[in-house]
Image (cartoon, rainbow, N blue to C red):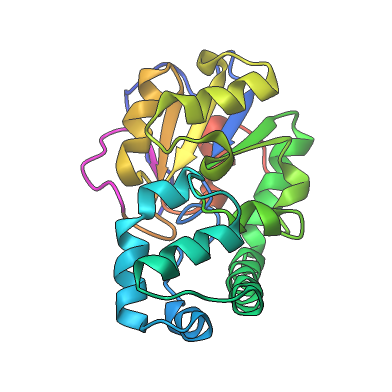
Amino acid sequence: MRPVRSDHGDRPRGTRRALLVDLFSTLVADREAEDLGVAGVLGVEGEAFGRELDATAYERFTGAYGDLGNTLRVVAGRCGGAPGEEQVREATDLRRGYVRRLLSAVPEGTVRTLEGLKSAGWRIGLVSDATAEVPLEWATCPLEPYFEVTAFSAEVGAVKPDPKMYLTACQALEVEPSECMYVGDGGYGELPAAAALGMYAIRTTEHADSAPSWTGPTITSFTDLPALIGVPSS
């Protein structure tokens, strides 16, 4: 299926020179809980641990509990556990290993597309709702070389659709929101929030259909992005 154009916003390219991109469900598959092993290492019951992960989602995604080790300690404590240092260290390694594998599973076409966009002069930033383990593993991700800046929620202290997430990336790139495009699956209102700041917002359904009511431009694969925004194929 070819990219879908719409009459939302101005011309895709125009004076825009920067691209902000979501991570999960956009560039890589969404995260799936791998909690039973971690719960077992921490000495707590798996179902209870899963519930507390859900209950503390906002705090974890905004970095309220500090580093990954302390975050796991806090969540285990809410389940009645009191893990020792070795347990926390092992659980931390498990979580980081899972994220490392997830970030390594990048479609080849996505990497080629980013490479082409960067070669064409686009400045690219990442805007991701991510818990503490994700920034720790970003440096080894195949995507990392194509991004000038990252705005991870656990480091920014906010989650989308908070404007702070987008503006942090814009400030790091030294561009105005009106000079940016934003690409995401549309979860949690990220697309209208980007558009409200003046960005040209584009929905992708490659990994998830998170915003079926979105009436703006939509692509079915990240590889369709260059054609939509007028970048010649390499």
The correct choice, above or below, for 136 with respect to 150 in the image is below
Query: Does 41 appear above or below 167?
Result: below
Q: Would residue 217 be counted in the magenta stretch?
A: yes
- Residue 144 position, x and y percent, is 73, 50
Q: Is residue 46 left or right of residue 112?
A: left
- Look at the picture and state if 38 lies above or below 24: below
Asked if the magenta segment contains residue 67, the reply would be no
Which part of the image, by quadrant, shows the N terminus?
Answer: bottom left
Q: Is residue 132 above or below residue 121?
A: below
Relative horizontal placement of residue 22, taking residue 1 as reference (left or right): right
x 63%, y 68%: residue = 96
Magenta-colored span: 210-219
Q: What residue is drawn where x is 55% and y is 54%?
A: 27
Near-viewer residue (135 or 23): 135
Q: Position of residue 78 (x, y in %)?
A: 36, 66
Viewer can see residue 37: yes
Q: Left or right: where does residue 166 sit relative to residue 85?
A: left
Tell which of 151 and 186 is nearer to you.
151
What residue is rendered at 63% in x and 19% in y? Answer: 171
Quarter holding the C terminus? Answer: top right
How far from the left and from the top, in percent, is residue 195? 38, 23
- Is residue 234 visible to us here? no
Q: Residue at x 32, y 29 (%)?
A: 192
**In this figure, what is the number of numbered marks?**
0
| Main SS, magenta residues | loop
